[in-house]
Image (spheres, coloured by chain):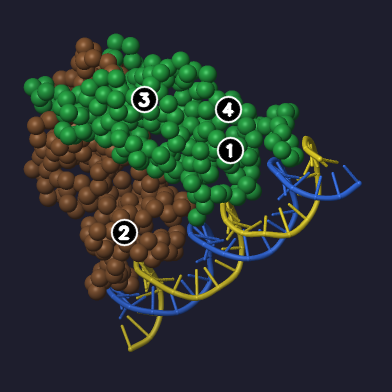
Chain colours: A brown, B green, C yellow, D blue
Amino acid sequence: MASLDFSQPLFTIDNVMFSIKNNVLHLLLIRRAAPPFDGCWSLPGGFIDIEQDSSVEAAAMRKLQQKTGLQPGYLEQLEVFSGKGRDPRGYSVSLAFFALVPYSAVSSNIATVSQASWWPVQDIASLQLAFDHQEIIQRAHHRLKQKALYSMLPVYCLPPAFTVGQLKAVIEAIIGKEIQRKSLMRRIEASNMFHLTEQKVSSGGRQAQLYQLKPGVDITHFNRNLGD
Amino acid sequence: MASLDFSQPLFTIDNVMFSIKNNVLHLLLIRRAAPPFDGCWSLPGGFIDIEQDSSVEAAAMRKLQQKTGLQPGYLEQLEVFSGKGRDPRGYSVSLAFFALVPYSAVSSNIATVSQASWWPVQDIASLQLAFDHQEIIQRAHHRLKQKALYSMLPVYCLPPAFTVGQLKAVIEAIIGKEIQRKSLMRRIEASNMFHLTEQKVSSGGRQAQLYQLKPGVDITHFNRNLGD
DNA sequence: GGCATATAGTGTCTTAGTGACATTAATGAG
DNA sequence: CTCATTAATGTCACTAAGACACTATATGCC
């Protein structure tokens, strides 16, 4: 194996954290306070601290906690973005994560952290973002769309108890397309991931059943996509 | 953003390169010649060279060329593996790739590179590998299996011209399960990725049509998995 | 109360793509 | 020529999603 006489690239973490607000897909950006790109909106991230971060996932979690005051219910590695041009400070390698969080969990904490705010995903393309964050966001959104078609992942955008109508709205916001309520019901039943609570919830018509994730279950993956 | 007074982790690349030999899924290991783990089999990889590698993908390609003498037809990021314990030299972050290559392309070059050889994936679990390479291989294999169920990715394990029977054998070797020839034919037609050549090939019975990738096409993804 | 309306949930037929397997096609061995 | 072998097709069954009508239960207004 080669020796260590190459200088190492700068290694950083970026997080694309999604949530649903008013039935619209949003993601969290923070305004940079230092060069390069100071003043620009950017993804919350930073450097890994090998003293306190037991893994890159731990580093991502710590950075999210630090910059936004909350921890996502779901976190997954997206992809590494690398090259000479993406950071003016030099060759850099950034591991991007994508995260999901219920919007309710955000609303109370986010106020205390200035310079961070939720943006509708559709509006992001027209912003001037730092680094190659536009591309990272596109990739994250694409991955999330795909996963919403064949898995129950979107539940992580909802509070612990939710209705079928809410889950349907979340999925539709993510994939940008209507789905059949009936199909979703079939999947909920087939997945065996949820149980009904005794509570019901009003939303202008007949009251809806509240569902809850069974403790310790894995996210079901189906072998067919929705919305062909 | 934080300043640079944290020491940076060691950043490395690992490659899980798959191919098919005698209708069995194999992957390429090299024997380490230096500590740590000298003498152990391990994944071909190493450090990125920021002078010559324009991206992490370029680094992965260069390392494969260097250590095995060949370049894969397909290369994709798998996942980052990180932590204090995985490398005795210190905190390390390794980006693993998975690669596919036709076995024919290997056979001539591999002889010139000592200490590299193909191993049946089933036999790997009983080897003593360096670092956390067992886990990396498991993850790569899992991902490859999944992709074989819903995409045409396995064609990258075949030479430029191939028969339906060969593709069927490759897919079966990857997913460890028989599939219906008919289903594969339907996908080949639906994907519109291939065209027939005039040539046919003998294999003990009726001659088989040779198919070829159309130039510049993307790998088709289906919205349903094989082999429910 | 009675009715309109809104949302929740079910029943059921259609549709699309795979599984299973029989059938036909082409080739080599004897 | 006959048979064994592999390639390719024809056809029906099965499964899960799409479409949409229909029932159920809540709220608000008269």
**Mark 4 Cα within 10 Å, few/some/many (few <14, many 20+)?**
some
Q: Which residue is mark 3?
A: B30
- How far apart are the two marked residues, 1 and 4, measured between alpha carbons? 10 Å
Mark-to-mark CA distance, 1 and 3: 27 Å
* Residue B219 seen in the figure: no
Q: Nearer the viewer, mark 3 or mark 4?
A: 3
Q: Secondary structure at mark 3?
A: strand
The residue under label 4 is which amino acid type? Pro
Report the side of B212 relative to B114 (left or right).
right
Residue at mark 2: A166
Residue B124 drawn at (x, y percent): 38, 38
Please give left or right for residue B97 compared with residue B37 in the image: right
Q: Left or right? Give the position of B165 relative to B93.
A: right
Residue at position x 44%, y 29% in the image: B118
* Among the two numbered marks 3 and 4 on one chain, the one whose residue lies closer to the N terminus: 3
Disc 2/disc 1 C-alpha distance (Å)? 43 Å
| Discs 2 and 1 carry the same chain letter | no
Mark pair 2, 4: CA separation = 49 Å
Q: Which mark is residue B167?
A: 1
